[in-house]
Amino acid sequence: MPTTADTAFVRKAGTVFKKRLEEATLVMVSHNPKQLEAFCRSAAVLASGRLHFFDRLQDAKAMYNYVK
């Protein structure tokens, strides 16, 4: 269970992240679908040594679920 400090940090970091996305592109690595949904529109999945690019996050999530 996250502490109040953890929750406040996550909220503040999310706000900063979203602000920076207005002016920049970022590369995020995560296995957390909710985190990816909050910040990403496109994605890539590394599977069997190959990197598969997707214009839509939903397509990447479908492949990731299949690969796991």
Image (tube, rainbow, N blue to C red):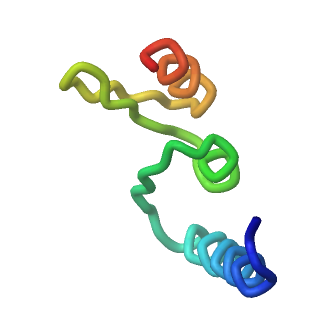
**Residue positioned most to the front:** 1
Q: Position of residue 60 (x, y in %)?
A: 51, 26
23 left or right of 25 in image? right
Q: Position of residue 50 (x, y in %)?
A: 22, 24
Q: Position of residue 14 (x, y in %)?
A: 67, 72
Q: Residue at x 63, y 27 (%)?
A: 58
3 left or right of 44 in image? right
Q: Residue at x 19, y 25 (%)?
A: 49
Which is more toward the observer, 14 or 53? 14
Above or below, comparing residue 3 to residue 25 in the picture: below
Q: Residue at x 23, y 19 (%)?
A: 48
**Residue positioned most to the top:** 66
**Residue positioned most to the right:** 4
Q: Residue at x 68, y 83 (%)?
A: 9
Q: Position of residue 61 (x, y in %)?
A: 57, 27
The image quarter containing residue 26 is: bottom left
For the N terminus, give its image quadrant: bottom right
Above or below, comparing residue 4 to residue 56 in the picture: below
Which is more toward the observer, 49 or 23? 49
For the C terminus, give its image quadrant: top left
